[in-house]
Image (cartoon, rainbow, N blue to C red):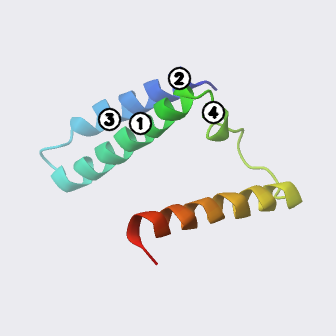
């Protein structure tokens, strides 16, 4: 799977949801915003050639490397949270 196919899938889902906006306005608004946000994240990562971080093949067993990557990412998020919002 590549970035263009992923983004096309998001655009298709947005179009499909928008057909039901009159009947379910809040649900449609929520899902459209979610899809747009995901698309922005994917496109941003693609600009830095990092999209493979999000487009991985399905489920994989967790190993020590994955746990280490998670802890590193968690630390970065916590540091960013403190920088943005304080302690």
10 Å neighbourhood of mark 1: few (<14), some, or many (≥20)? few
Provide the secondary structure element on which disc 3 rests: helix
Name the residue that disc number 3 marks. Answer: 14
Horizontal placement of 52 versus 65: left or right?
left
Q: Which residue is nearer to you in this view: 43 or 29? A: 43
Disc marking residue 50:
4
10 Å neighbourhood of mark 4: few (<14), some, or many (≥20)? few
C-beta proximity under 8 Å, tags 4 and 1: no
Horizontal placement of 80 versus 39: left or right?
right
Above or below 64: residue 30: above
Name the residue that disc number 2 marks. Answer: 5
Residue 66, position in %: x, y? 79, 56
Q: Which residue is nearer to you in this view: 22 or 40? A: 40
Disc marking residue 85:
none
10 Å neighbourhood of mark 3: few (<14), some, or many (≥20)? some
Q: Nearer the viewer, mark 1 or mark 2?
A: 1
Q: Nearer the viewer, mark 2 or mark 4?
A: 4
Name the residue that disc number 1 marks. Answer: 40
> Which residue does the image show at 44% across and 41% down from the upper left?
38
Q: Which residue is nearer to you in this view: 7 or 65? A: 65
Q: Residue furthest left?
A: 22
Residue 42, position in %: x, y? 50, 35
Disc with the residue nearer the chain's start (1 vs 2): 2
Disc with the residue nearer the chain's start (3 vs 2): 2
Q: From mark 2 to mark 4, how far is it between C-alphas?
A: 16 Å
C-beta proximity under 8 Å, tags 4 and 3: no
């Amino acid at each position: 799977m590549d970035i263009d196919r992923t983004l096309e899938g998001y655009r298709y889902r947005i179009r499909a949801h928008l057909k039901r906006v009159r009947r379910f306005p809040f649900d449609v608004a929520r899902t459209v915003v979610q899809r747009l946000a995901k698309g922005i994240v994917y496109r941003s990562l693609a600009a830095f050639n990092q999209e493979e971080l999000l487009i991985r093949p399905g489920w994989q067993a967790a190993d020590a490397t994955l746990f280490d990557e998670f802890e590193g990412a968690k630390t970065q998020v916590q540091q960013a949270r403190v920088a943005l919002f304080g302690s």
